[in-house]
Image (spheres, rainbow, N blue to C red):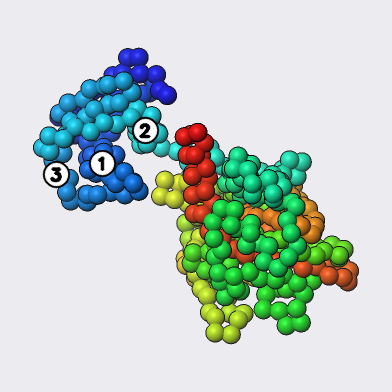
């Protein structure tokens, strides 16, 4: 809880805003923002937290006419409604928006850790039964997925459909034209190069979809071959290194759309255009996409920038191939791994012997994972 021994507030612009000292830090809030985000029962449903009023129900001339602390609650009286609403100090601190802007684009939040090959020594791994049966272990594993964009599970069954039980730990399967689950093994007439014994360049899956699946799960049912090791690379670390080497190259890849397409299944034609490095309006690094096999001709970069764009694109590919950035492992029967498909690239070394290798995969969306994390954290706080 915040230290409110001597809370200070000051109305600004005739009550159009308020300045509040929260644990030694001065934060400013607009009256309209506070009124719109009020948590009282008349503004938001106590049952589901959804708003019961619209923005047009709030007078545009809304201002604060009085502010008074009562313990850790700040009571604000709004005019012209004449309504007093309480705001918890912890809530105000958690939702403060009056803060310095990031120094440069490409930043990530405190819950994200970028990594390189050094993660091999302590890659996040957990036992399936423990994650399934223990809420604390499940929260730890899910937060590892959030932090690193990658984690492994052991002790899984080797039966058909096993990826779906991994997805059920936090959310739901995202079905695509590949089906609810898909098998990764050698096929005579493959619709995708994953279904061969060739090595696969590091890539993110399905960039030709809009939106692309946020998570991919791959589980091993059988593996009797030589080679075929799995490789994962942190695309956020690739973006960081590219930006450090070439700010202009980074800006070009973030500032122009690439194009992707898929036509490997009869009756299916998938196309999308998204940047290889996606930034939010505030410069936050949101996603990395890279899939040479599915890249269509890039036509959204002007002539004057195309040569430099390709120079940056090539350097991105070189960084992705750098062994110093790769975590390698052989997936064994009863094991699975999950990747954030909008961040972590995965690859496979060529299979160099005969024998059986059977993996199954499925997709899921990140909202289920993030929702489960938030719900488990809320349950912990209430305990």
Residue at 52% across / 42% down in the picture?
Answer: 376
Quadrant in which residue 30 is drawn: top left
Lower sequence index among marks 1 and 2: 1
Mark 1 surroundings: few (<14), some (14-19) or many (≥20) residues within 10 A: few
Q: How far across and down, in percent of the image, does residue 117 sit?
A: 73, 45
Residue at 40% across / 23% down in the picture?
Answer: 2
Side (left or right) of 74 relative to 128? left
Q: Please give the label number shown on residue 91.
A: 2
Lower sequence index among marks 3 and 2: 3
CA separation, marks 1 and 2?
Answer: 16 Å
Mark 3 element type: loop
Mark 2 element type: helix
Side (left or right) of 229 relative to 58? right
List the residue tagged with mark 1: 41
Residue 283 visible in the picture: yes
In the rendered image of this protein, does residue 310 appear above or below residue 355? above
Nearer to the camera, 311 or 316: 316
Give the foreground label among 3 and 1. 1
Lower sequence index among marks 3 and 1: 1
List the residue tagged with mark 3: 59
């Amino acid at each position: 809880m915040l230290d409110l021994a001597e809370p200070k507030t000051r109305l600004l612009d005739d009550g159009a805003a308020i300045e509040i000292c929260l644990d030694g830090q001065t934060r400013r809030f607009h009256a309209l923002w506070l009124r719109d985000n009020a948590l009282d029962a008349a503004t938001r449903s106590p049952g589901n937290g959804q708003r019961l009023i619209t923005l047009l129900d709030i007078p545009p001339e809304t201002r604060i006419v009085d502010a008074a602390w009562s313990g850790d609650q700040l009571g604000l009286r709004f005019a012209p409604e004449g309504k007093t609403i309480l705001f918890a100090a912890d809530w105000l601190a958690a939702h403060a928006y009056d803060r310095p802007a990031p120094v440069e684009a490409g930043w990530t939040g405190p819950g994200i850790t970028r990594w390189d090959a050094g993660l091999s020594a302590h890659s996040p791994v957990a036992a399936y039964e423990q994650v399934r049966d223990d809420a604390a272990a499940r929260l730890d594993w899910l937060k590892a997925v959030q932090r690193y964009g990658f984690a492994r599970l052991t002790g899984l069954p080797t039966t058909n459909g096993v990826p779906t039980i991994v997805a059920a730990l936090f959310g739901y399967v995202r079905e695509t034209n590949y089906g609810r689950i898909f098998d990764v093994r050698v096929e005579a007439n493959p619709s995708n190069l994953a279904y061969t014994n060739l090595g696969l360049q590091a890539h993110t899956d399905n960039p030709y979809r809009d939106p692309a699946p946020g998570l991919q799960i791959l589980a091993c049912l059988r593996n009797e071959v030589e080679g075929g090791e799995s490789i994962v690379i942190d695309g956020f670390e690739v973006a960081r290194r590219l930006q450090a080497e070439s700010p202009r190259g980074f800006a070009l890849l973030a500032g122009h759309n690439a194009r992707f397409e898929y036509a490997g299944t009869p009756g299916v034609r998938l196309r999308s255009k998204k940047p290889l490095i996606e930034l939010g309006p505030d410069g936050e690094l949101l996603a990395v996409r890279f899939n040479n096999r599915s890249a269509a001709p890039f036509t959204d970069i002007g002539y004057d920038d195309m040569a430099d764009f390709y120079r940056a694109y090539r350097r991105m590919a070189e960084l992705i191939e750098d062994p110093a950035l790769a975590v390698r492992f052989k997936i064994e029967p009863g094991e699975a791994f999950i990747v954030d498909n909008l961040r972590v690239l995965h690859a496979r070394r060529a299979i160099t012997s005969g024998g059986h290798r059977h993996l199954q995969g499925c997709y899921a969306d990140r909202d289920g994972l993030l929702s489960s994390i938030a719900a488990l954290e809320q349950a912990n706080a209430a305990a």
